[in-house]
Amino acid sequence: MMKNYVVKLAENGNIAVDDTILVKGAQSAAGSRILEGFEPLFSAEAVDRLEKAGYTVAGKTHVGEFGLDLVGEFSYYSEKSEDGEAPLKGAAAEAVAGGEVKAALGVDMNGATRRAAALSGVDFLKPTYGTVSRYGIISCAASGEQLGVYAPSVEGIKEVMDVIAGHDAKDGTSLREEKYTYATDEAVAGKKVCIIKELLEKADEDVAARVNAYADKLRAAGVTVEEISLPIFDIANTTWQILMTAETCNNVSRYDGVKYGHRAAEYKNIDELYVNTRTEGFNFLTKAVILYGSDVLSKNRYEDCYGKSLKVRRVIADEFAKLMETYDAVLTPVCSKSAYTAYEIDKAFQTVFEESVFTAVANLIGVPALVSGGVQLLGKAFSESVLLSIAGSAERAGE
Amino acid sequence: MKYEVVIGLETHVELNTKSKIFCSCGGHSEAKEPNDCVCPACSGMPGMLPVMNKRVVELAVTAGLMLNCEISRYTTFDKKNYYYPDLPCAYQITQLNHPICTNGLVHLKTSEGERDVRIKQIHMEEDAGKLVHVGKASLVDFNRTSVPLIEIVTQPDFRSAEEVLVYLNKLKTMFRSGGISECEEGAMRCDVNISVRPEGSEEFGVRTEIKNMASFEAIEKAIRYEAQRHMDALEFETEELVQETRRFDDVSGKTFAMRNKETEADYRYFPDANLMPIIIDDEWLEQIKAAKPVEIDEKADAYREAGISEKEIDMLIHNHNVSKLLDDVVAQGCDAKNAAGWILTDCVGILRKNGKLLTDLEISVEDLTAIIKMVDSGDVNRMSGRKILTAVLEEGVDPVAYCKENGLDAKVDTSVIESIMDRVFAENAQAIADYKSGKVKAKQALFGACMKELKNTADTAVIKEVLEKKLMDI
Ligand SMILES: [Zn+2]
């Protein structure tokens, strides 16, 4: 079962930690060659809190370089599958699905963790922005990335969230609340959930059928489910890709071969050290993100791209808030299909962009997103307990 | 033709804080070895996040208040991107869109007259590290990375190098007295924007910028050189002026154009999502205003009124910590002039004996107040007071306990002094004879002998009284 781990730390470990999250003394490289050999001096706050609460880290699970891909297919450290046709899966989600660990931590930056959870049939919660410390995650898109939890069930998610959520002075974006508590068994009868027509149309028949079957389960539990039209998700996705690529481009610029991680063997001067190190250290997808990101931040494009995106982010947040005055949750697909197959990295930027239409809004405006039963529930900020309880009722109905 | 020189200034000032701007590393100025004062955050390791040092905001606001600025109630940080090995994150955190202070005004008095210089803005930012070149290798030292700076940007309101120097000296005095910055050599760096136009012209001439000068002398020379170069170009068409960035060469005293590559970079500024906007509400602003030291001119007047000498005032104004010590001791009920003497004569004397300076002075308000009050009340004499002060400064003893342990208490019974005096008189027949023959100095010998017997304790006034009385009897 070694294949899920970049670094295995404890045989009896009960929690897996994605390679985008720091664990003291263990290589933490975010799936990238550029950070090869980097061993942090501190663990992420969430890892610290779990260890203090008695959890043991089983190991560092593979992630695609900086979490930019679909589910983890482009990691520098993964062993390549012999059978190129094997469906793509995420390592942490598989470790949880296979019962190797009770739960896992992942960084949700562009949906990879949620897609991985959906494909492996486990739950994943991307909590409200600011409720879980981002201290010790290898940061790419600071304004929307969030540390989240994989578990086999909503109870498993609650157990971990109860430990890790709450204020951390080491993270300037961490909210003031000292402690959050989560419920999975609030009454759901009478709650209202909407399905977004535009998103359902982007999914294949299998996935659409799964969403509808899930809706029926909720109806059986007394939840009202209606289909509505709300054409904000494409715009939300484009907006997030602009912000995400810009922030990532900036945050990975510190990986220059000077201080730690990979350094090119050949260079004659500082410019060559930078260029050769980064040419060797980043994969094609990261390079594409860097190029897009630096373009949208350039002087003559800034106002039209980045500046405008910041404004659109506010408009989308308002639109979504308005929707949540009527509904308790939004039910959507997570992926356009039930399984992904291997593809070439030069297609990755466009492929991930298209798939992120389901996930991007939660990163863009910081609302919670829960993947369960292969579908996604979105809610307003701090409504994790509502989402967990709705999903909980569906999970219990399935038993 | 007569020409007018137009100058604008960007001044970087290092703030006097215990720790860096976004992490808890402290004491970079005392760091002995390169990279002594670094942590994962200020050396750009992945996963570390900047956390705002509130003190930086307070000092920047105080500087803004001193320069009559509007204080922004909403202020944010931006990232400025460029690659250089001394910049560990490959971006500098600075303020572009919502600087902390705007629209200030400084009044200058020069030999040529008076002028108001408008302050465009003050913003907060972090410093970079430095490169050390050893043979063919280049090494990086991050001790200075994330040291807090403010950058003060003026409008193009200066008309001479003299005005610039008066301004810089004023900033220096103000910031030192206000505890905002030590303004030591190198802790104040300037970029100078300069252009020249025919006198009376409304339009600005071609502007050049001279970057990163750390000494006032260099700034003055650079302005004079550059202004002359512009005037020559206009008058004699010696060269065509272009808008560019230049550097000043100390050795030749000339300015040189920098390569375009360095000056035309696109820094791709954008907001830093790791730092939430800072809201300065009424309550916080009032607290900062209340803690703001009084203006130096007002302060000097107050000291003058208390009878403190001009020389002492000068020492106080330039040493924020010392003037604060004096103010605090005075607040405890000590007389200002007397206390100033204790600090600027006695303390300085003791420090000097130990090869130290006034800036090294470390004494608590309580200890100094206790010593001054012991002497004022006559509990110990002046000489013992100084002895106690020496022990406090050199050994860090408790003044009251030290006084007791060493029998310095001046409360010696008058009868004891009288009996000692009897003995002194019996043993010093020659001195008494001298006194009788009119040698007044002999009185001093008798006083000294008595003091010696009393081990220099006792209230000197009482000794003198006893002595006078006995001398009258002989
Ligand atoms: Zn530090």
Image: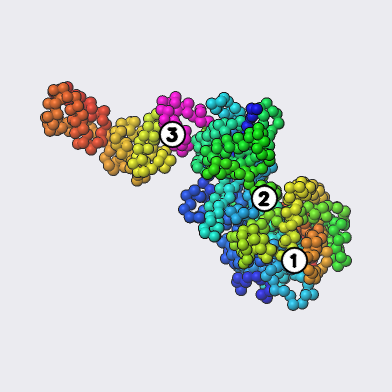
Residue A392 is marked as none
The answer to whether A9 appears left or right of A224 in the picture is left
How far across and down, in percent of the image, does residue B387 sit? 30, 39
Q: Residues within 10 Å of mark 1 (few under 14, many from 20)?
A: many
Among the 4 quarters of the image, the one containing residue A72: bottom right
Q: What's the chain of the residue with tag 2?
A: B
Residue beneath label 3, please?
Answer: B315
* Chain containing the residue with disc 1: A
Q: Nearer the viewer, residue A221 or A78?
A: A78
Q: Are marks 2 and 1 in contact (CB under 8 Å)?
A: no
Q: Which mark is residue A71?
A: 1
A35 to the left or right of B379:
right
Given the image, on which type of amino acid does mark 1 rest?
Val
Q: Position of residue B217 (x, y in %)?
A: 52, 38
Disc 3: CA contacts within 10 A as few (<14), some (14-19) or many (>=20): some
Q: Amino acid at mark 3?
A: Met
